[in-house]
Image: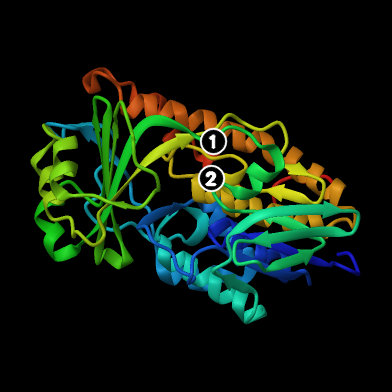
Amino acid sequence: MPSDTGSVMVIGAGLGGLTAALALQRQGWRVRVFEQAPALGEVGAGISLSAGSGQGLASLGLGDALLAASGPIPDIAFVHYRTAALLAGRFARTPPPDQGFDTSRHIHRADLHAILAAAVRAHDPEAVVTGRRLTGLKQDSGGVTAHFADGETARADLMLGADGSRSSVRRALFDDAPPQFAGQIAYRCLVPRAQAEPFLSDGGAVVYVGAARVFNRYRLRKGGLVNVVGIARTEAWPAEGWNIPASVDEFEAAFEGFHPDVLGLIRQSPPQTLIKWGLFVRPPLQDWSQGRVLLIGDAAHPILPFLGLGAALAIEDGVMLARALGATTDHDAAFAAFHKARLDRVEAVRSQTILQGQIIQASDPDKADLSQSPSQRPVLFDYDPSTAPLHV
């Protein structure tokens, strides 16, 4: 570890930003995380925590908290959207044995976010600053200065852009085109177990495969909640934002013709947790850094959600970056080593996610070749950022 680690400012207090902040704090870096929201918190619902990303977070001292807040992902059944006939996988009618981080896990996004935020603040109660929207940045030979909408500034040796697919840091560095609509709209909500139970006849985790549509549901918080996600192709997406309130009627209309269990779950959607958002993509960047500023997570490499690995990639970035910066006092060398170590992994996940979407939204579900599904490839989920090769 370098004797003089220095200071880092992180723009964005999401999963990737907080993971990077915690990993760097544990190496002795002085870290400030700037979040544009007025209060720290996380919306959303369930996410998949890959086995490898779980191991990466455990290496930061979070293992016990994560195991307590999450559960192992059961066998997943891929079924016909209308008949619920099994197409691939296996029905899991009883909870699987808990093998810790040897397998992937489901966790409520807010629970994971709270665990990370608490750990960062335990190192430094002042580490996270809310209500700060980045409007510009300026680099010089000694560091980076951030300018915020409220007129405040901040300075550090390095800056990390962890502010999502609509990243202000990315725009300041590269001035590239905005994200492009991917022709997909996603719906998500949480249904309490009591209301969901009549519609869970086919086990704990089921993916309904339909033409241009896919519906996924699984249990969270020891079975007390059911996470519901539906993704449908569409021609236009006029709205901005990723957590726009949706109505039960429009959700149901988007999945007309699906199995009664699907429609029953949709009708139980609590209005306060039912949201929708458009899926957007960006062309890959040739590099993720410029000078003293580096992009991580969705700011660098946003992907579609069909494999549930977006959060994993952001977490992996945070762990791997801290390893790179811990190996050398030369930030240019650290950034270059980080990019080289991560590029193949990110591109593999990106391409396999696209393939997964094509398979599970096939025009004819009866002829979909689910044997080729990337979700059956453990190597995609076992990548451990705390031990993955890194050469600085």
**Toward the viewer: 175 or 65?**
175
Count of numbered circles in the view: 2
Residue at label 1? 178
Q: Position of residue 167 (x, y in %)?
A: 58, 47
Q: Position of residue 160 (x, y in %)?
A: 69, 55
Specify the quadrant of the image occupied by residue 322. Answer: bottom right
Whether residue 26 appears in this view of the structure is: no
Mark 2: secondary structure: loop
Residue at label 2? 166
Q: Position of residue 18 (x, y in %)?
A: 59, 64
Image: 36 above or below 82: below
Which residue shows up at 51% across the image and 52% down it?
51
**Toward the viewer: 310 or 375?**
310
**Toward the viewer: 248 or 88?**
248
Which residue shows up at 58% across the image and 56% down it?
16
The tag earlier along the polypeptide, 2 or 1, is 2
Asked if the residue under mark 1 is in contact with the one under mark 2, i.e. CB atoms within 8 Å, the reply is yes
Q: Is residue 332 left or right of residue 352?
A: right
Which residue shows up at 19% across the image and 64% down it?
192
Instruction: Please name the amino acid that badge 2 sits on.
Output: Arg
Which residue shows up at 63% across the image and 34% down it?
176
* Colour pattern: rainbow
Whether residue 122 appears in this view of the structure is: yes
**Residue 236, numbered circle:** none
Local crowd size for mark 1, using a 10 Å CA cut-off: few (<14), some (14–19), many (≥20):
few
